[in-house]
Image (cartoon, rainbow, N blue to C red):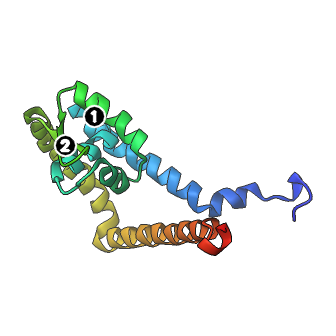
C-alpha cells in the first residue's frame, strides 16, 4: 500500500493506463470524423446512430444501444434531435417495442454520411497501412474482450447464488 502521494508515479500511470490511452485516442478520432461530418451538420455519434438504424438488423432499442456501447437513456437523448430534424421516426413493432426508422430525409442523410465517412476512413487508413489498420482493430478487439471478461467476473461475484440468498 502506498503511504503518500509523493510515492505515486502519476506520469507512469498516465503513460501506461489503458483507459487514458483509449480516451485520448477516441477523442482524437472523434474530432477527425467530426470535421468530416460537419459538412452534413452532424457529429460522429449521430452519424453512427443513423447508420445503425439504416442497417435495420436491430430488433429493439436495447440492441441499438448495446451495439453502440451506450445505455438506453443515452440512446433516447441521442434520438430526440434526430427525430426533431426529421431524420427518423418511430415505428411500433410487436408488443410494446418501438424502433427508430429512417425517414426519406434520413435515408438521404445516411448517403451523405457514408461519403464523408469514407473520406475520413481513407485518410487514417492511408497513414496506418493495411497491416497497421488490421493490428489496431485486433488490439482494440482484444482490449474490449478483456474488459468484458472482467465485467462478467465481477457480475458473477456480485450475483448471489440461490443457496446464498436463502
Establish if 113 lies above or below 149.
above
Q: Are marks 2 and 1 in contact (CB under 8 Å)?
A: yes
Determine which residue is flagged by label 2. Answer: 113
Establish if 158 lies above or below 56.
below
Q: For the N terminus, which image quadrant?
A: bottom right
Tell me which residue sits at (27%, 34%) in the image: 42
Determine which residue is flagged by label 1. Answer: 42
Along the viewing direction, whichever of 123 and 33 lies nearer the viewer = 33
Q: Earlier in the sequence, mark 2 or mark 1?
A: 1
Give the x, y percent position of residue 127. 32, 61
Give the x, y percent position of residue 155. 57, 66
SS class, disc 1? loop
Tell me which residue sits at (31%, 38%) in the image: 35
Give the x, y percent position of residue 14. 66, 56
Give the x, y percent position of residue 28. 44, 47
Q: Residues within 10 Å of mark 1 (few under 14, many from 20)?
A: some
In the rendered image, which quarter is residue 104 located in? top left
Residue closest to the far front: 166
Amino acid at each position: 500500500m502506498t503511504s503518500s502521494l509523493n510515492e505515486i508515479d502519476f506520469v507512469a500511470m498516465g503513460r501506461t493506463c489503458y483507459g487514458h490511452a483509449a480516451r485520448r485516442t477516441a477523442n482524437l478520432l472523434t474530432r477527425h470524423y467530426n470535421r468530416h461530418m460537419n459538412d452534413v451538420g452532424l457529429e460522429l455519434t449521430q452519424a453512427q446512430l443513423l447508420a445503425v438504424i439504416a442497417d435495420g438488423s436491430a430488433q429493439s432499442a436495447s440492441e441499438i444501444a448495446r451495439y453502440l456501447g451506450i445505455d438506453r437513456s443515452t440512446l433516447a437523448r441521442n434520438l430526440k434531435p434526430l427525430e426533431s430534424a426529421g431524420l427518423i421516426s418511430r415505428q411500433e413493432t410487436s408488443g410494446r417495442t418501438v424502433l427508430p426508422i429512417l425517414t426519406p430525409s434520413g435515408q438521404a442523410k445516411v448517403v451523405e454520411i457514408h461519403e464523408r465517412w469514407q473520406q475520413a476512413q481513407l485518410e487514417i487508413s492511408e497513414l496506418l497501412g493495411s497491416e497497421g489498420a488490421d493490428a489496431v482493430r485486433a488490439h482494440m478487439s482484444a482490449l474490449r474482450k478483456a474488459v468484458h471478461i472482467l465485467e462478467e467476473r465481477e457480475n458473477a461475484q456480485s450475483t448471489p447464488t440461490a443457496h446464498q440468498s436463502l
